Image: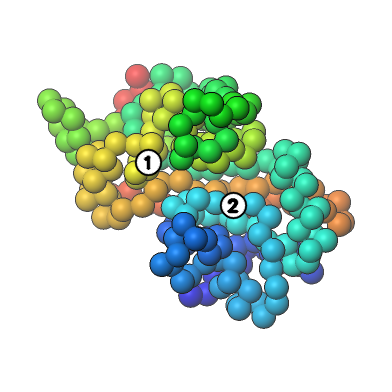
Amino acid sequence: MTLPLLFRDEHLVAINKPPGLLVHRTALAAHEDEAALQQLRDQLGQPVWPVHRLDRGTSGLLLFALSAEAASRLGAMFEQGRMAKRYLALVRGWPAAEAGLVDHPLARDPELPSAGQPLLDAQTRWQVLERMTWPVATQPGFATTRVALLAAEPLQGRRHQIRRHLKHIAHPLIGDATHGKGPLNRALADYLGRQRLWLHAEQLRLCHPFSGQDLALRCDAGWTWPAHPQPACTP
């Protein structure tokens, strides 16, 4: 697989990661041979360093460093929140407002019980981009299902932050097997003709760690929906 390059200079490279691809090999998925880090290294013919992560199911913009020094500088920028990230998220239901801020602390490890873990500050801004009603029955007594396309901007980088925050406001991501609804996910996967986590890293803005240039990197999702969804009405 050739990974699409979105940006490259002597210090860093950005790719479009497809959904389902690991960022790097891990013991938690020991049966998986393919990962973005190893593929990109072989594709470029030089070492690369990951400076942030995307969940395996998330697609979109993923940044790598091309030297240990660049990795150190970029890693510090991510740790200090000196990056502006924007994601596209397809969620269940229609939010009551057009935009909002989820301010909800999160435990560090979402795979462990929250009790006993320190809670970390976490805020995510969101905005409705599109409201849709699809002719899919996912609840008894309802012939249609409401979904919304959101822009989501996490102000930190907590693990599964967007997924957990959207669940917290009762609008879980479509295709999220951990935080979403199984029957709804399966019904919409059949309708859309594809089973995936509908979360995409669309934009990343940062100050170049060496030149100081303002970089605005973008990765279009290219998402399309069935041709004849029912038109949505403003609530």
Could you tell me which residue is drawn at 59 percent across and 26 percent down? Answer: 119
Residue 53 numbered mark, or none? 2
At mark 1, the secondary structure is loop
Is 214 or 32 nearer to us in this picture? 32
Up-down relation of residue 38 to residue 225 (above or below) = below
Could you tell me which residue is drawn at 66 percent across and 59 percent down? Answer: 50
Up-down relation of residue 183 to residue 101 (above or below) = below
Coloring basis for residues: rainbow
> Label 2 amino acid?
Arg
| x then y, percent, for residue 196 | 36, 52
| Residue at the extreme front | 116
Q: Using the rendered view, name the quadrant where residue 23 is placed.
A: bottom right
| x then y, percent, for residue 133 | 28, 34
At mark 2, the secondary structure is loop
Could you tell me which residue is drawn at 61 percent across and 78 percent down? Answer: 42
> Label 1 amino acid?
Thr
Q: Is residue 90 left or right of residue 183?
A: right
Is residue 228 visible in the rendered structure shown here?
no
Give the mark nearer the N terminus: 2 vs 1: 2
| x then y, percent, for residue 84 | 68, 41
Q: Is residue 221 left or right of residue 234?
A: right
